[in-house]
Image: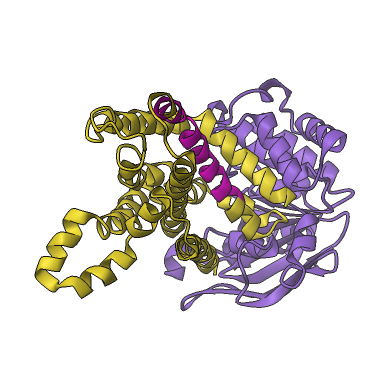
Amino acid sequence: MIEIENLTKQFGHKTAVDHLSFSVRKGEVLGFLGPNGAGKSTTMRMITGFLPPSGGDARICGLSILSNPREAKQKIGYLPESAPLYNDMTVIGFLRFCAGIRGLNGSARKEAVERAIETCFLQRVAQQSIDTLSKGYRHRTCLAQALLHDPEVLILDEPTDGLDPNQKYEVRQLIKRLGETKAILFSTHILEEVEAACTRALIVDRGRIVEDGTPAELVARGNGSLTELFRKVTTLDRAAA
Amino acid sequence: MRNILTIFKREFVSYFSRPIAYAIIVVFILFAKGMTFTFGSFIASGDASLNYSFFSFHPWLFMLLAPALGMGMWADEQRNGTIELLGTFPISPWSIIFGKYLAAVSVWFITLVLTFPIVIAVNWLGHPDNGIILSGYIGSFLTCCTFLAITMFFSACTRDQVVCLIVSVLVCFVMVICGFDGFTLQVSRILGREAVESIASIGVIDHFSALTSGAFRLQDLVWFLSIIGGSLLGTSAILTAKRA
């Protein structure tokens, strides 16, 4: 469902993503791990068509994001890292707007918005203005936006960032449930999350894949600890500098 | 087309869900009318036209108020990160640019429509040529659209609204002053008459006053549309370049 081939991004002389290749199949939840600045968000931005790659291509359900951007984008639900929202709108107004952009109208739009509100537990704040929401609700509103059109592929950039333990648990359960029928790529810093929600995980460092395997395999490679493996295969900030 | 409408609706409602649109409407009407009855000597001149007394002040007001309305068009999106959402929606960048631009233009259209009491007043007091008044409104609206397009371009260049406001006001000011009589007189004294013509050609006043005096010339329309078109193209180029 997601096929990445030699994806590369250079900012000036700096290579943020270096010939990255991997794929995510339907029913798979791929955890995307790596230290800060490893190129996770840049990779996701290229897959979703926000950033043009310097080289390589990403195919979503067989559609190239470079040659068929509109069709490919239609298949993706994307939660950006900072969960950006329009603060002057209400939650329901924002979701209606996003559904409209996705080509949903009339009763289809109403149903999609209701379903997304229900899935992300937003009933209590649906009529509330977005600038009055707490961080957890803001994150879930942005996640709801990604689910509106029931996409086949979900790209989630740190979906549990800033959530309290209860919300984290709920979002992980949600990812697990959605992963049964979709292809999900999600990035995280929290290593336990990988064991809790992923069927497979990649560790990237300085734009390259350094580990790839199921959570159990990775834990075994780290002598029983994913943290141990992570520390072993990734570069420390000061070493990178 | 449907996407332009969706973006347009969001932006248009957003202007009115914040104080910005109301502030622009009130300030513009207040100043436009205030100037008509003071500097414009609307009553004292006894002339049943709006050319000097009403329209001639518009470029000066637009120069400040059009950038004030438009400075957040892209700057806000870039600061809040919502540009990333827009960039990953399955719509063309042009739908977003047109939708946003039309929403800002519509706020100004409403503002100009709301100055209608002056038209009623001048018709009640005398027998004006309403065709010239309509042409004046068209000139006024096109000037405002031009300044909005320029503001949109600078808004795409920076995420800082204040920088956008300052630069846009400056550029619009240059376009207004270049055709202003007091300024062109000084220029002709120093540099001669030929220089005046080339300087005035940069300015908006030449094209604006042709319309307010009722002359509907194709060259003016082309001038306005090419500046608007150029600014929108520039906006698209800047947004693309920023992502690369």
B140 with respect to A42 (left or right): left
How are the residues colored? Answer: by chain
The chief SS type of the magenta part is helix
- Among the chains pictured, the one given yellow colouring is B
Q: From the top left corner, tell me how far across and down residue A145 is, in percent.
A: 71, 41
Residue at the (39%, 58%) spot, across then down? B207
Q: Nearer the viewer, residue B76 or B99?
A: B99
Residue at the (50%, 34%) spot, across then down? B113
A61 with respect to B101 (left or right): right
Q: Nearer the viewer, residue A45 or A103?
A: A103
Residue at the (84%, 49%) spot, across then down? A179
Residue B150 within the segment the image draws in magenta = no
The magenta region covers B99-122
Quadrant containing the N terminus of chain A in the rendered view? bottom right
- State the residue lying farthest toward the top: A124
Say whether residue A58 is visible: yes
Image position of A22 with respect to A73: above or below: below
- Among the chains pictured, the one given purple colouring is A
Residue at the (73%, 65%) spot, across then down? A69
Q: From the top left corner, tell me how far across and down residue B26 is, in percent.
A: 40, 28
In the rendered image, which quarter is residue A111 located in? top right
Quadrant containing the C terminus of chain A in the rendered view? bottom left
